[in-house]
Image (cartoon, rainbow, N blue to C red):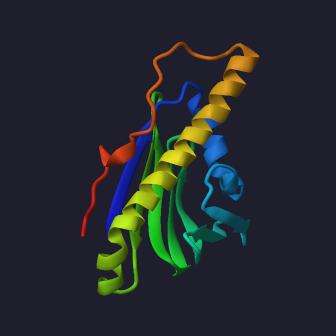
């Protein structure tokens, strides 16, 4: 299973960040590859992603929801993956793990999948950051800099194979 870790500092209240992350049906607004996230019940969601002409779909359940510090999930059908958002007063991290169905396929596509997953994680965090910080600046409640950008290019990534 491959594991990706991305982090970003967001100048917004931790509760506001958590509340936005919990609205998973809105994730297609923050990530170009996601075409749909639909709520099935209070803990289960159906996800559909389209990347480079390949459609991936899966059902995921929320395995942990500890407001405002952690939201975790795992797939129960379809594309095998899991992950968690971990929040502190100064940063948001997302850890994604995924498994491609066949060793040969995973070996062949791992470089593309790693770049795609890094891009997905970084893009979601950057767009959440931009939305929350622009809202805070408009209301006059924004915190002072510094701003840390997402850790692109795999500097914080951990690949476990």
Specify whether 111 is left or right of 79. left
* Rendered residue at 64%/66% (across/down): 43
Where does residue 116 sit, x and y in percent of width and height?
Answer: 46, 60
Against 146, residue 151 (above or below) is below
User: Can residue 42 be seen by looking at this rendering?
Assistant: no
Where does residue 22 sit, x and y in percent of width and height?
Answer: 64, 50
Against 62, residue 17 (above or below) is above
Residue furthest to the left in view is 161
Specify whether 42 is left or right of 67. right
Where does residue 115 sit, x and y in percent of width and height?
Answer: 40, 58
User: Can residue 107 be seen by looking at this rendering?
Assistant: yes
Where does residue 118 sit, x and y in percent of width and height?
Answer: 42, 54
Q: Quadrant of the N terminus?
A: bottom left
Residue furthest to the front in view is 52
Against 60, residue 10 (above or below) is above
User: In the image shown, does 23 or 145 lie closer to the viewer?
Assistant: 145
* Rendered residue at 27%/60% (across/down): 159
User: In the image shown, does 129 or 93 lie closer to the viewer?
Assistant: 129
* Rendered residue at 44%/28% (across/down): 148
Against 156, residue 43 (above or below) is below
The picture quadrant where one finds residue 34 is bottom right
* Rendered residue at 46%/55% (across/down): 84
């Amino acid at each position: 299973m491959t594991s990706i870790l991305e982090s970003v500092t967001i100048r917004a209240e931790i509760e506001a960040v958590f509340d936005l992350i919990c609205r998973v049906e809105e994730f297609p607004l923050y990530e170009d590859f996601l075409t749909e996230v639909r709520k099935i019940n209070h803990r289960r969601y159906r996800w559909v992603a389209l990347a480079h002409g390949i459609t991936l779909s899966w059902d995921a359940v929320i395995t942990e929801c500890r407001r405002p510090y952690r939201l975790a999930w795992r797939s129960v059908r379809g594309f095998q993956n899991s992950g968690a958002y971990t929040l502190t007063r100064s940063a948001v991290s997302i850890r994604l793990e995924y498994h491609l169905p066949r060793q040969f396929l995973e070996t062949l596509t791992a470089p593309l999948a790693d770049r795609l997953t890094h891009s997905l994680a970084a893009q979601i965090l950057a767009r959440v950051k931009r939305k929350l910080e622009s809202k805070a600046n408009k209301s006059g409640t924004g915190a002072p800099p510094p701003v840390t950008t997402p850790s692109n290019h795999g500097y914080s990534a951990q690949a476990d194979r």
